Every structure is written in C-alpha cells, then in structure tokens.
Image (spheres, rainbow, N blue to C red):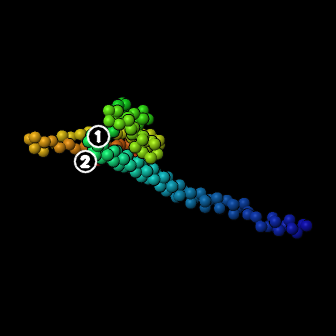
Amino acid sequence: MLSRLKNIGASGFTLAEFVVTIAIMGTVMTFVLPSYSDITLETQRTINKSNMDQIKDIFFQHFYDTHMKGKPHLPPNPSNEDSVMDEEWASTPIDPNFSMITPNQLFTSGEVPVNSNGNPFFYETWIDTIPASPNYNEYQWHITITDIDEDSPSYLESITYSI
C-alpha cells in the first residue's frame, strides 16, 4: 500500500514546473488578448456597416415598391432631437395617407437594425429637384445612415446613397 502512495505523488507537477507553465501562459496571453480585442472590434464594426447597408437596401426596396404604386417615397426623417431611428419612429406609419406600414414592418426581424451596442443609427433623407427641361423636373432621392454612438467601433461611419 505504501508503494502505491509513493507512485501517486511522483506523477504530479512540482512547484517549479507549475510556475514556469503559468509564466509561459501569461506571456502568450499578452500577445493573444490584444489581438482578440482588435478582432472583436473589427467584427462589431463590420456588423454595424452591414446593418446600415441592410437598412439602406430595405428602404430603397420600399421606395421601388411605392414607386410602382404611383407614390414613391422613403421613410421620413425621424422627428426626434438627434434624428435617430428610435422605437417611436420605427413604430410610426411611414405614410399614413398611403399605407399604415411602419419601418419595423419592412424588416423580417420586425425591427429596424441597430448598432452592436444596441443603439439606433442617425437617419436622414432628402430630395433634390433637377431641372431637366423647361417643362420637366427630375428628382433625386438621397439617404444617409450614420453611426453616432461614440462608444461604437464604427462611430461616425456612414452610408450615403442616391437614386
């Protein structure tokens, strides 16, 4: 029985081996953690840009649908102080005289996408009138979506698109 106990003790780590292992792991972690943080921030930035692009695509699809029905329009600018696509704006009908559809209903998830911190994007749309001839004007619709969350990895990045 005594010989079995000696073998069990002999198969473990010594304190020196344990300290060296911890030191090596600490050294490796000094290289890995900053890389992991950078990768996480870049992934969040890419997701935010993708969400802004998705909003743009869905809003212009809505524009094309309403154009085919004879009344082209984009979702209106938010009326809140920061012009962000908050829940109140996203739940309000886009054009109550034409349709009761809300911005949230344009998305399969039932919600307008937000940034990686869960905050809404800034949204602005406008129309330029371009005289094409003395009796005819052309219209150009514009949209800008910007991440205005200071804690976001895509802070102040935006998408602007025109048709």
Judge whether residue 89 can be spotted in this image.
no
Is 48 above or below relative to 127? below
Drawn side of residue 26 relative to residue 140, left or right: right
Q: List the single residue furthest toward the left.
A: 134
Q: Amino acid at mark 2?
A: Ile
Residue 12 x %, y %: 76, 64
Residue matched to label 1: 73
Drawn side of residue 118 relative to residue 98, left or right: right
* Mark 1 closeness class: few <14, some 14–19, many ≥20 residues within 10 Å: some
Q: Amino acid at mark 1?
A: His
Q: Residue at x 29, y 40 (%)?
A: 73
Tell me the element at label 1.
loop
Residue 151 x %, y %: 44, 42
Is 100 above or below relative to 152? above
Instruction: Give the label on residue 140, or none.
Output: none
Q: Viewer-proximal residue, 24 or 107?
A: 107
Drawn side of residue 6 relative to residue 110, left or right: right
Q: Residue at x 59, y 57 (%)?
A: 26
Residue matched to label 2: 163
Tell me the element at label 2.
loop
